[in-house]
Amino acid sequence: SDISKDKIKKFFEKEVPVSRIDDSDEPSGYFVYVDSSNTTEDLRKKAIDTFDGKKLGDTKLKVAITNDSVVQVKALDERRIRVKLTGPIPYFLYLLEFGIFAPSPKHVIEKMVEIHGVANQELWTRPENIVCSSAHCLSKEQFRQYKIFTKNPFYWNADQVKIDRIKVYSIESFNATLFFYQSGEIDWTGGQSLVPSEYIKFVKHLKDYSNDPYLGVYFYGININKKPLDDVRVRQALSLAIDRKALTDLLSADQLPFAGMVPDGLAGYKALDLPLFDPDRARAYMAEAGFPNGSNFPEVSIMYNTTELHKQVAETIQQMWKKNLGINIKLQNKEWKVYLDDMTSRNYEIVRRGWIGDFPDPYTFLELMLTTSGNNRTGWSNKAYDALIREANKESDLDKRLELMRQAEAIAMEELPFIPLYVYTSTYFKKPYLKGFWPDMQNHHLWKHWWIDERWYEGEPVTDESLSNQMPSEMSKQ
């Protein structure tokens, strides 16, 4: 463990590609993650055969595949597990919501292998095979049409589950979704079927419509190794020359203009008080960098993937930078795969980015800017920032932890490898008789809490009769 991570990485990469190296307390040493994404070869076995017992400097390496003696997770009994962490992780319980932590039914998977010769997920997750531990279980599925979930009588709190049957539709068109909603077939338009921005001004006055803050930030990534973007004054100027309020007003999607990377109030976090727009300071920074009124500013491009929203944002910012800084910016619209490849290889100057938080904790956003983060992709690295984040994740005092993270964000927002633009929102329609439903930043809505208020059926209609008349023509035709 006295050997640096860089030396370990370079040593292993002589024979096997390495995607990541982490510290290990028990046993003392490192976790080495071999990158086997592009090969069927067992690189872990190759690493052991090649390096176990070899010397690196004066140290004799001991290399082994991680087993349950290292992974500190143990089943205490049929209902409980114990997890031993290397340090305090306040967001740990939220991590357990990820599908990768769901228990897999070994007996069913083995049965599918015995019958079909393969552990295909599509087989053991079919209604007739699936093992379910939630309040509702999949009972019927019509591919690309709908799924039906029924109440699980074996659920530990089944007596408190009030809805017996839930039907989830697979609908690609929002117009069709709205038609189903208006006809009473759908009670909630769903977490992913957001109301298109071009319709929001027609519906935002309706009682059925909701707009909740969402755990996501829309931002631009800056390749800081490209001139003149390597000058922090240029990056500051670009950020301050964006009128974020005007941008979100133009988009008409009820987004929240924002100039930081961590939304306010997240796990008690106090967001930085950063200006949304300051064209005078922007021009001053640009002049200091040697480009007064945009003079002699070289060609720079914004790269974005193909959607109408990203195009509209890029065109609006292009106009703002022309008006406020006197610079001309090119736009590059690229197909999704090319966009991803170019972003990963840093073949860009400015790139459209966005991040949906994995869990409600500031770290889910701040991790993006770590030197070691695979999602950084800007070339930016700051030792003080990295150290503060590492210290924060070892801090058991929550207030101190948040303050350390705030200090780290202040460093990043001063140097601006990312230029934040706005916080996402979740827009949807929900019938007023659907109860037990609350706004949630992650758009997680547990069916076990839902219930139908039958009193609504005895009174006036629950839908707004003016809905069709208020919609654009292509929607009202539905």
Image: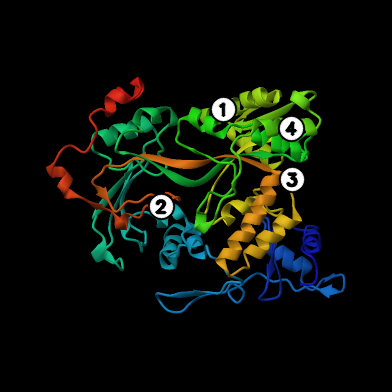
Q: In this picture, is 227 found above or below 41?
A: above
- Looking at the rendered image, the disc whose residue lies closer to the viewer, 4 or 2, is 4
Position of the N terminus, as image quadrant, is bottom right
Q: Earlier in the sequence, mark 4 or mark 3?
A: 4
The vertical placement of 101 against 186, above or below, is below
Give the number of the disc on residue 444: 2
Residues marked 4 and 1 touching at CB (< 8 Å): no
Label 4 vs 1, first from the N-terminus = 4
Rounded to the nearest angstrom, the CA distance separating label 4 from label 1 is 28 Å
Q: Residues within 10 Å of mark 3 (few under 14, many from 20)?
A: some
Q: Tell me the residue that label 4 is attached to.
A: 284
Q: In the figure, 5 relative to 365: above or below?
A: below
Q: Which residue is mark 1?
A: 311
The outermost residue toward the top is 473
Q: CA distance from mark 4 to mark 2?
A: 44 Å
What amino acid is found at the position of numbered circle 4 in the picture? Answer: Ala
* CA separation in Å, label 1 and label 3: 25 Å
Q: Amino acid at mark 1?
A: Lys
- Which-is-in-front pick, marks 4 and 1? 4
Q: Position of residue 161 (x, y in %)?
A: 26, 60
Displayed quadrant of residue 284: top right
* Identity, as a three-letter code, of the amino acid under mark 2: His
- Give the residue type at disc 3: Gly
User: Residue under circle 3?
Assistant: 379
User: Mark 1 vs mark 2: which is more N-terminal?
Assistant: 1
How many neighbours does mark 4 have within 10 angstroms: few (below 14), some (14-19), or many (20 or more)?
some
Q: Residue furthest bottom?
A: 76
- Residue 263: percent from the left, percent from the top? 53, 49
Estimate the spatial distance between the alpha carbons at disc 4 and disc 3, rounded to whole Å. 26 Å
